[in-house]
Image (spheres, helix red, strand yellow):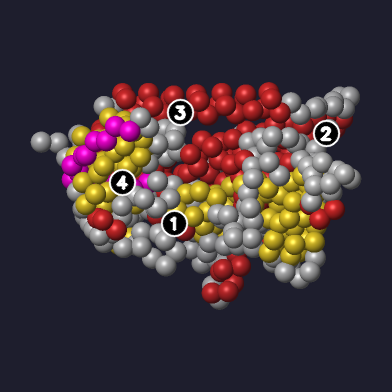
Amino acid sequence: MALRFVIIGGGPAGHQAATYAARLGGQVTLIEKDVIGGAAHLWDCIPSKAMIATGGAMSFMHRVQGFGLDEADGHIDLAGLRERIGTITSRLEAATTELLESQGVRMIRGTGRLKGPNQVVAETADGRIEELEADRILISTGSRPRIPEWAEVDGQRILTTRDAYPPPELPRHLVVVGSGVTGVEFVHMFSSLGSQVTLIVSRQQVLPKKDAEVAAALEENFLERGVNLLKGAKAIGIDRLTDTPDGADGPSGSGAVTGIRVRCDDGRVVEGSHALLAIGSIPNVDNVGLEAAGVQLDDRGYPVTVGHHLQTNVKHIYVAGDVSGKLPLSSVASMQGRKIAEHAMGLHTLDHRHLDYDMAASAIFTEPEIADVGLPEAEAFAMGRKIRVTKVPMAASPKAWINNDTRGFVKILSDPYTGVVLGGSIVGRHAAELIAVIAVAVTNRLKVADIIDSLLVHPSLSELLADAAE
């Protein structure tokens, strides 16, 4: 009898696990209540990148004079943008669904919860209930935007990320709370689309966990765009502003909401037309029945995992994706799903290459783009580790001048004794694509000489990788 593998959650981790387990002979059932492909992926990640691409196109039109062309003037079409996003996500969901069906994966549209260590209850939208027996279970139910107690989200003026693809109207002045990866992408996105933007930065630099030079380059770009950076301020409240005194209806106005006010812990306030919260996420583990199966949670609400294979304390129950508490990246979730499927189906019981989160490449789709992988420079110095740091500006590349965009740099970190590549950061056009070369080098412990000796295309931005390696 084939091994019965039940997966709750059809995001990048879930559908990858389902595909691989089915290929390995498993009897796979996938339960998903929202969208095959994952809500966080298709309702957050992909729409945000689509809007960033639109904003990038608008920014490019303002720079076309550098190509010997007359300046173009783009106007945002929210309805058209909304339709474009819908088309992209629906096509991606259809492609993922088709792949799963081709592998023989059974899909149930509904919610799933554990009834016991080996029992899963699936309930469809029309109320049909089915109990499934499982030999292996994967929980990949994702996450949702975190909403603090001091903010009352209405989806109109006070938004989470999922209310903003695009919002009901283009904000005149958007106040973004949160200066991590998601926050800065929204700053870039809406400033590109023409909104005035204020970013509340709780520390003294944006992207507090990133390389200081990278953060400084992004801050410089924000200031050039006219973004207001409110540093060292922590938001503690958001008020709606109306056209009547104290928000009360009266003869002087209709009581309609006209804007928002964000209050900070140091007494500063900033007013705008809309506020957007980008202050993290929380795992979707409510009503999944983890307690019924004996799965332990940590103090953050994430299931406790044991070993490299993301098993919980109940060995045949795995977790992956955002709910695993590891790096919240779609690429990481996909790899987790693949590794879990292989382990659940009896592979990787001996030594093999485990998923190393320190080697995961990541990107921030601002303008210029930011990407990094491997050992951070600041962390290396804090550890007292000797490293070799080489850096080349984008302006050293003929292709950057051809593109009329010389912003940014390529930085590579290596071991000064062995030449092994330890990490790198890239700021500039196509950074998310270029970082792949450094990521392969880090993962496979290649040396800088391996990059230097590669015959790369000329003219291309990739030549900067060899220059930086020297």
- From this view, report whether residue 166 is shown above or below residue 94: below
Q: Helix or strand or loop: what does disc 2 sit on?
A: loop
User: In terms of sequence position, does the residue under pointer 2 or pointer 1 come before the other?
Assistant: 2
Using the numbered discs, state the Cα–Cα distance from disc 1 to disc 4 in whole angstroms.
Answer: 22 Å
Read off the residue under disc 3. Answer: 93
User: In terms of sequence position, does the residue under pointer 3 or pointer 1 come before the other?
Assistant: 3
Q: Are marks 1 and 4 in contact (CB under 8 Å)?
A: no
Q: Nearer the viewer, mark 3 or mark 1?
A: 3
Read off the residue under disc 4. Answer: 113
Q: Are marks 4 and 2 in contact (CB under 8 Å)?
A: no
User: In terms of sequence position, does the residue under pointer 1 or pointer 4 come before the other?
Assistant: 4
Q: Nearer the viewer, residue 285 or 24?
A: 285
Q: What's the amino acid at mark 4?
A: Arg
The residue lying at 57 percent from left, 68 percent from top is: 379
Q: Helix or strand or loop: what does disc 3 sit on?
A: helix
Find out whether residue 134 is within the magenta segment. Answer: yes
The residue lying at 64 percent from left, 60 percent from top is: 150
Q: Nearer the viewer, mark 1 or mark 4?
A: 4
Read off the residue under disc 1. Answer: 326
User: In terms of sequence position, does the residue under pointer 3 or pointer 4 come before the other?
Assistant: 3
Using the numbered discs, state the Cα–Cα distance from disc 3 to disc 1 in whole angstroms.
Answer: 25 Å
Read off the residue under disc 2. Answer: 63
Q: Helix or strand or loop: what does disc 4 sit on?
A: strand
Relative to 288, 37 lies left or right: right
The residue lying at 49 percent from left, 63 percent from top is: 418
